[in-house]
Image: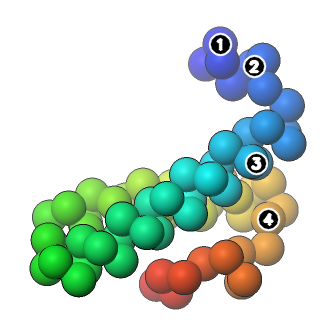
Amino acid sequence: MEVMEDMNNAEIMKNAMDEFEMIQRYMVLAKKEKATETYAELKNRYLLLKALLNSLGVNLIEIDKIKE
């Protein structure tokens, strides 16, 4: 929690967007490799990041490649 208190919304948003993009890349790879357990774990993180970004007012229409 201490780290989050030191970050402003712009920093939180940038970090979450970077992680969101990375998670999506890994999800695409996991799906391609038929790694269902890995995909399920990544999807959990994806949904958490998506909720965070939505709460920060980020429009995910353009950056959400998974569309689930």
Residue highlighted by disc 4: 58
**How far apart are labels 4 and 3 at the CA level?**
8 Å
The tag on residue 13 is 3
Element type at mark 4: loop
- Residue 3 shows up from this direction: yes
Q: Classify residue 68 as left or right of residue 35.
A: right
Label 4: how many Cα within 10 Å (few below 14, some 14–19, many 20+): some
Mark 2 near mark 1, Cβ–Cβ under 8 Å?
A: yes
Mark 4 near mark 3, Cβ–Cβ under 8 Å?
A: yes
**How far apart are labels 2 and 1 at the CA level?**
5 Å
**Residue 40 or 62: which is nearer the viewer?**
62
Label 1: how many Cα within 10 Å (few below 14, some 14–19, many 20+): few
Q: Classify residue 32 as left or right of residue 59.
A: left
Lower position in the chain sequence, tag 3 or tag 2: 2
Residue highlighted by disc 1: 2
Q: Which residue is drawn at 34% across and 60% down?
A: 42
Residue highlighted by disc 2: 5
